[in-house]
Image: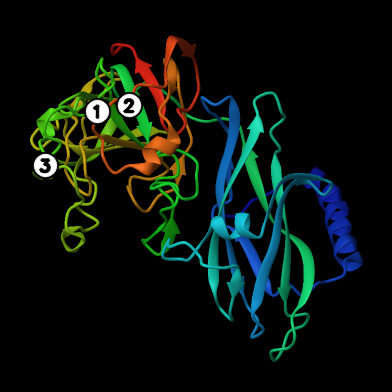
Amino acid sequence: MILRLPRRQWPFLAVLLLAVVSFASDRTDQYTPVVVSPLTPGTQAVLGTDGKRHIVYELVLTNTSPTPATLEKLEVLSDPSHVLLTLEGPSLVKVLRNTSSSPAVNAELDLNSTRLLLLEIALPQDAPVPRQLLHRLTALAAARPGPAAAPVSQTYTVAPFTVGTIVPVIGPPLQGKGWIAVNGCCEAAGAHRGTGLAVNGAISFAQRFAIDWMKLDDAGRLVHGDAGDVHNYTDYGAAILAVADGTVVDTLNNLDDQVPGKLPDPSTITLENVDGNHVVLDLGNGVYAFYAHMQKGSVAVSVGEHVKRGQVLGKLGNTGNTSAPHLHFHLMDSPSVLGSNGLPYVIDSFDYDGQVSYEKFEATTELTGDWGEGRLRSPSPRQNEFPMNLAIIDFGTAK
């Protein structure tokens, strides 16, 4: 595309170009053997049920030198003098991932080695959200290009990253009380947050803000009786709702439920069946909603159909790569459920009813027992917030 500007703007452009040339001539170039770039150009801060605004994104780091490099520290800056987050030592290694999504064992990078750095900035609700983030890297690395040489410690600022504050506002994907936001945002070790996949020629984190919704009964149980029977789970068969008006762009409806208690044989999982029976909605403006693991034969909509907010799309099941009935839900920036960027969002209205204990949930492989101990005596009405990991949420009836 050719952009033609009116002549009256030419003098301004000449001054601007002169300024840019002058700025470049005053700069001193620095050799930066570890190159750093954001995986995506930017993201949006989102207000969570924990009262903080969360900025979630990834950096890509590659050592271009024959001299091995060791990452020593990474600082996230809102401006050159204001540090929002410092990672070093174990805290830095904890959020480093190999390109296969497996955790990095250390902060060392050989020639051509690449690591992904999974970042989360949590700001107080009343703190200003920076329009841009910078990243100050300190690494023990090559001091000059050429053959391998003794590494030296050096620091440089790289990878500017834009941050916005406008996110999609949607309705609830379910109805009723006692829904737990399982595997939610934003720990790097989380099942969703930590999973990047190489799809369609790029590494994508489609599930950055994904939630596995599971339901408590009045006694605080996720399951009663035999945990190997899908029908004994409180959420099994729950109605799944359109979160906004939209158009159906993809469905799958013919897979059988898995037997709960364990994941299916990995050799049987493909990109086509990993999410089980599902629906993808085009909500407009480049935003898509994804619903996964639905019951066989329950999908009530078809490709090309226009749906309204609150319309029933199908029933909650246990199909695909799942070990227990739940609704996997996330928003994304393309219809590709795995080859897209996961988007933050807020739900316009719900009641916050407490938290499931993170320590208890992580310490067990069983879903039996009482999980409602963290419920509040009086749920807190919330508007335009994102349910954080293990939050207990009460949704109203469909509008």
In the rendered structure, which disc, 3 or 1, sits on the residue that comes first in sequence? Answer: 1
Q: Is residue 22 visible?
A: yes
Image point (60%, 66%), residue name = 61
Image point (69%, 75%), residue name = 33
- Tell whether 69 sits left or right of 288: right
In the rendered structure, which disc, 2 or 3, sits on the residue that comes first in sequence? Answer: 3
Instruction: Report how far apart the C-alphas of labels 1 and 2 lie in the structure.
Output: 7 Å
Q: Camera-side residue: 283 or 152?
A: 152
Q: Which amino acid type corresponds to the residue marked 2 in the rendered image?
A: Trp
Image point (61%, 58%), residue name = 90
| Quarter of the picture holding the N terminus | bottom right
Image point (58%, 51%), residue name = 41
Q: Which mark is residue 222?
A: 1
Q: At which x and y percent is residue 140? A: 72, 73
Q: At which x and y percent is residue 115? A: 54, 66
The residue pinned by badge 2 equals 371
Badge nearest the viewer, 2 or 3:
2
Q: Is residue 92 above or below residue 83?
A: below
Q: Which amino acid type corresponds to the residue marked 3 in the rendered image?
A: Asp
Is disc 3 surrounded by few (<14), some (14 to 19) or many (20+) residues within 10 Å? Answer: many
Residue 44, by quadrant, is top right
Q: At which x and y percent is residue 66? A: 64, 86
Query: Secondary structure under badge 3?
Result: loop
The residue pinned by badge 3 equals 257
- Marks 1/2 in contact by CB < 8 Å: the verdict is yes
How many numbered discs sit on the rendered protein?
A: 3
- Tell whether 218 sits left or right of 9: left
Q: Which amino acid type corresponds to the residue marked 1 in the rendered image?
A: Leu
Q: Is residue 64 above or below residue 254?
A: below
Q: At which x and y percent is residue 175? A: 28, 18
Q: Is residue 285 visible?
A: no
